[in-house]
Amino acid sequence: MNSFAGFVKKEFLHIFRDPRTLLILFGMPVAQIMIFGYVITNEIKDIPIAIFDQAKDRASREISNKLVSSGYFSLKMNLNSIKEVEPVLRQGEVKEVIVFEPDFNNKMESGNKGTVQLLTDASDPNTANLIVSYTSGIIRDYALSRYGSEKMPSLIEPKIRMMYNQDLKGVFMFVPGTMALILMLISAMMTSISISREKELGTMEVLMVSPIKPFQIVVGKLIPYIVLSFINAVVIIALGTFVFGLPVRGSLILLLLESLLFISLALSLGILISTVSNSQMVAMFISLIGLMLPTILLSGFIYPIENMPLILQWISNIMPPKWYIIIVKDIMIKGEGLRFVWKETLIMLGMTLFFMLAAIKRFKIRLE
Amino acid sequence: MILIENISKSFGKRLALDSIDLSVKDNELFGLIGPDGSGKTTLFRILCSLLLPDSGKALLNNHDVVKDYNKIRRIIGYMPGRFSLYNDLSVEENLNFFARVFGTSIKKNYGLIKDIYKRLEPFKDRRAGNLSGGMKQKLALSCALIHRPEILILDEPTTGVDAVSRKEFWEMLSGIIEQGITIMVSTPYMDEAVLCNRVALMQEGRLLRVDSPQAIIDAYPKDIIALRADDMYRLVMDLRDFPQADSVLLFGQEVHYSGKGKNIDRDAIRKYLEDKEHKDIQINTISAGIEDSFLQLMA
């Protein structure tokens, strides 16, 4: 046991002595969550708009105020002629132009036939769609509050409620995905690199010719990374909660346990990678290409799995992060318990066992 | 005791070891001499249970290297060709780590490594990566010894190390032998062979000769002379053209010459060289050195 403790201590020393490892371990999670949370976002916030108000009456002004005070839009300019509309859109100064027809208020009063034209820059169609639906939502809201629904019988009013993520915050999508990505990368890449480094430096040869068992080498390599990855998981959840206001609606303990399971899964993958690579470089490339890309592309992190071609949907089933992301979303955002995620948990458990056994079986007691 | 019987090993089509038979006695300092690629490392890796032989068997203190590999790994100390140390750990941490892996401590076996480690002790907090080649070598030896192995296997420990450190290293090996440990060491340097109790000369996966260094020297079959002249390069070339010449080899400032027969006609050589207009010709009869013997065996 003493020899095993010595091994674990050595692993911790390796990690704390290497600035690059430390940077990847602790800098990357924070940086990624910030980047995904702030920069790559599909939220509507302070979208620049222009208004061409030909009516300049009560209704048009009230709607304009409502739009600007919503926080989703910021009024860049007021236009005075329909000719100005195209240039400002073309130059990208504004993303949307709202045109009120002349005598708007009176038309609304008389027969509910006031019209508003919404012109958007659809070079980014997703954003354009969002902008239009937000704007029309606000206008509808105004009409409702002014006349009440009973006075608008002819209008079918779809009441949309975005469940669980009412504000359509992108961070709700990105935090679980980033957690999966970071835990996968750190756990799998770092362990595979650290084992292949021993092979590269020849120290593995000396370790093999010692009473320490392969099993102990593997577990000794795992322990520091389990601890550190777990700390990372906690840091990411804390960042999501305190910086981005992402709630943990379900059980925090369950969430942490599931994270621990995912970490073990990623670590066993890392060991498996190290058994097939003899240098740190190879280990890193296999980890990056074999694990990071699929995590980003095929796990539902960025592209919804339902929209993929059928064959990719099947492939996504063998991507461990897919199941973890489902679990995290269910627990954090929907507040579900183990009752709802047991299936995914079992799948991850099965994968962990499979990779662990394969890794130990492949881990050699000799050089060839 | 190390007993090697009929060990063969190939890598793909290349035969790395060709039916090696060898035995090393208890508490012997045994040297394996041979050029790069002669199979020394492969043989050592088989002895350390790191490689499986294709055929034959090897016993280390009566433990089979294939079947009893767990036992083997407790009784041997192994120093691979590259100094396998953790460069980011300090001298003391490296030693401590290897001690703990073998379930012992520096304190317990300090007596064994004292002579070696005391030279390193002033640098014990320095990272191993910042040590000189000679110091790395001493540290690697200390690490291989820290668990008091019965058999010490050293793969080219003096390669890439300066001459002073090489000399010190062999002195340390004599110290270890006094502690009752059996040592098997490989080296490409023939001059180190005389420091062993017995040596085996290895070439292309085969053992050419196994004997004590003195016996190998004594077995040199011919007379040998050392020659000097003003232009050494031309001297070598001309001697090789001499009809009676068998082996003409440059050793530092001298050329060692032996003829086709046992005896050498020195006057004939002198006359031949004078005809070729060599100046300051010196010819001395010498006794063969270990290198002459090896080169003759390998030719």
Image: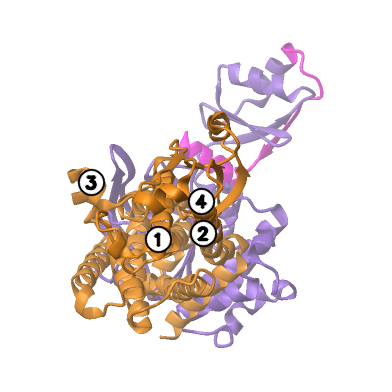
| First reached walking from the N terminus: tag 1 or tag 3 | 1
Q: CA distance from mark 2 to mark 1?
A: 10 Å
Residue under pointer 1: A141
| First reached walking from the N terminus: tag 4 or tag 1 | 4
Any part of residue A33 in sight = yes
User: Which subunit holds the residue at mark 3?
Assistant: A
Chain painted orange: A
Q: What kind of residue is marked 2?
A: Lys
User: Which subunit holds the residue at mark 1?
Assistant: A
Q: What kind of residue is marked 3?
A: Leu
Of the two numbered discs 3 and 4 in the rendering, the one whose residue sits closer to the viewer: 4
Q: CA distance from mark 2 to mark 4?
A: 10 Å
The disc label shown at residue A66, or none: 2
Residue under pointer 4: A60
Of the two numbered discs 2 and 3 in the rendering, the one whose residue sits closer to the viewer: 2
Q: Provide the secondary structure element on which disc 4 rests.
A: helix
Q: Are marks 1 and 3 in contact (CB under 8 Å)?
A: no
| First reached walking from the N terminus: tag 2 or tag 4 | 4
Marks 2 and 3 on same chain: yes
